[in-house]
Amino acid sequence: MPSVHSAFVAFRRAPLLSALSVTTIAFSLFAFGLFGLVALNIRNALEKVEERVEIRAFVSEGTSFEDIAHAADSIKKFPDVLRVDIVTQEQALARAKKELGEFSDVFESSFLPASLDVKLREGHRDPATVKRVADELRTLSFVDDIRFGEEWITQLYRLRNIAGVAGAALGLAFAAVAVIIIGATIRMAVLARSREISIMRLVGATDGFIRRPFLIEGAIKGILGGLLALLLTYVAMRLLQQYLHFETAFFDQRLATLGVLFGGLMGLLGSAVSVGRHLRKV
């Protein structure tokens, strides 16, 4: 395609400017990638914590196992419920001794009550859903008490919402900076080729024909910058792992591909804005 060929010719004509443009774009996207990596690991950490969300309904002493089992079968049918575990007094005692080994000698066989431990489905662990299921469990006649860490769950989701809003705001800010940088590099390319553009207009070239190679050039620079930023982000992650000695998750193939394509899209947008504005001045 002539437009693609023209874009690569522009790279060969000004290799230093093109390399500087790609590097500048890469560092802008690198900052975006670092923040995205932090946001990804925060989300993963919150999801792991969220997996521990459960409702524990303590059963009155003397309640028959048949009544508890019948109630467990009914609770399993709740659309929000993933699993219901029946914990007998003996199992509760064994669990307490395991989790609080230093106090194991003070526990007696009848010290802890039996309970129904209710795990909710993924996507149904928000405070409102947990409270609604807990209120339904309170209607059971043999349930003495309900524990589900209401304040803890509320704080967890508040933190998750804050992280999501902050991530979106900073992500848009980094994206805007990248678009501005790409637009500036394309502007320099337009000005450097102003005489060539004037000649093309004299021989009848339309603005669309003149604009197309610049758009392709911007998209290519964005993709190359995205690939370099992805490499820099991976290297930074590995260095942090070696220095801080903890494991972090990296972008999967889908997210990495979307990140590179996002770089290309920003390059295209930056080029479109810059070329449309500066062609009128040439």
Image (cartoon, rainbow, N blue to C red):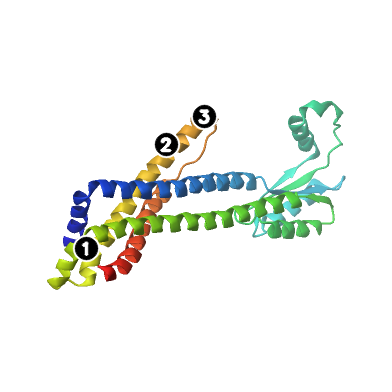
Task: Return the mark for residue 235.
Answer: 2
The answer to whether residue 78 is left or right of residue 166 is: right
Residue 250 screen position, x and y as percent: 46, 42
Residue 188 screen position, x and y as percent: 29, 57
| Lower position in the chain sequence, tag 3 or tag 1 | 1
Residue 136 visible to the viewer: yes
Disc 1 secondary structure class: helix
- Residue of label 1: 194
| Lower position in the chain sequence, tag 2 or tag 1 | 1
Q: Label 2 neighbourhood size at 10 Å, few (<14), some (14-19), many (20+)?
A: few
Kindly identify the amino acid type of the residue bearing the numbered disc 2. Answer: Val
Q: Label 3 neighbourhood size at 10 Å, few (<14), some (14-19), many (20+)?
A: few
* Residue at 20% in and 53% down: 8
Single out the mark in the foreground, 3 or 1. Answer: 1
Single out the mark in the foreground, 2 or 1. Answer: 1
Quarter occupied by the N terminus: bottom left
Residue 1 visible to the viewer: no
Disc 2 secondary structure class: helix
Residue 221 screen position, x and y as percent: 30, 52
In the depicted structure, whether residue 237 falls above or below residue 2: above
The answer to whether residue 253 is left or right of residue 156 is: left
Task: Return the mark for residue 103.
Answer: none
Kindly identify the amino acid type of the residue bearing the numbered disc 1. Answer: Ser
* Residue at 79% in and 46% down: 65
Q: Are marks 2 and 3 in contact (CB under 8 Å)?
A: no
